[in-house]
Image (cartoon, rainbow, N blue to C red):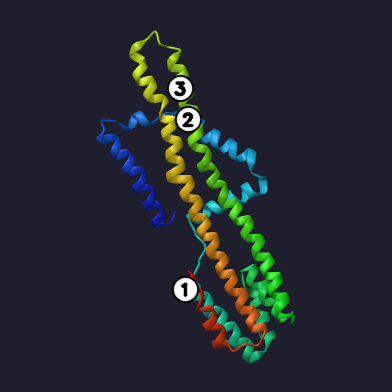
Amino acid sequence: MDRLAFAGVIIGVGAILAGNAMEGGNLSSLINLPALLIVFGGTLGAVVVQTPVSTLSRALAMVRWLVSPPRLDPRQRVVMISDWCKLARRDGMLGLEKIADTTKDPFVARSLGLVVDGTSPRTIREILETETQYRLERELDAAAVFASLGGYAPTIGLIGAVLGLMQVMGNLSDPDQLGPGIASAFVATVYGVAAANLLFLPLAERLKTLVLDGASLDDMVIDGVVSMAEGEHPKTIETRLDSYFVRS
């Protein structure tokens, strides 16, 4: 997880634990394995029921972005596209073939390949925009999986609390156990609300932001290669692409 996101989690969890301690609580009162199983197991089960396998797999794969987020550098992308334009102007469109064959970015390879093949600018735009829109929708669906987790977790936490209270009500003959039993029952609610608001919902928004930022860079590539195919001057193309800094 990158440092900023990690710091946010630490601040949120730390504030809750500190507040609990200031109110006279102790850490052991927040540790309840049955509640943990009910909340996280129940929440995961609910999301698995509603989510297609392909979307769920993609969501799990996107979790790695918290550790190693995609490199999203608009300025670097502008410089890269500008270099393509200068190369094409000097050596012709076939000069881009080597870059298309060696790049590790499939979208860049496909974009340059269309230019090298002499595809019309209009067709290039239609093909690439269709591809990026499809990928954007799939990735947003995957990010929404975590929003669903955040939606279910508090409700499952309430179910856990009710189950705990049922156990307490079944032992009313022992008044000494009522207080600790009721307190323990509400731990599931704490887990559900905390998991939703400190983990699942922030994670969903963070992934959504990364997806949209990546889509913006794809749009930049589309504008660049289409302008290049139309024969625009490299400086004109670079100036147009600089407008993406206003949006980012």
Q: Earlier in the sequence, mark 3 or mark 2?
A: 2
User: Identity of the amino acid at label 3?
Assistant: Gly
Q: How many marks?
A: 3
Residue at point 47% right, 30% down? 158
Residue at point 46% right, 17% down? 167
Q: Position of residue 5 (x, y in %)?
A: 41, 54
Q: Earlier in the sequence, mark 1 or mark 3?
A: 3
Instruction: Classify mark 3: helix, strand or loop.
Output: helix
Question: Which residue is identified by label 2?
Answer: 158
Is 223 left, or right, of 94 in this rendering? left
User: Identity of the amino acid at label 1?
Assistant: Val
Query: Can residue 83 be seen at all in this image of the molecule?
Result: yes
Q: Position of residue 17 (x, y in %)?
A: 32, 38
Residue at point 41% right, 34% down? 190
Determine crowd level at label 3: few under 14, some 14-19, many 20+ residues with C-alpha closer than 10 A.
many
User: Identity of the amino acid at label 2?
Assistant: Leu
Residue lying farthest top? 173
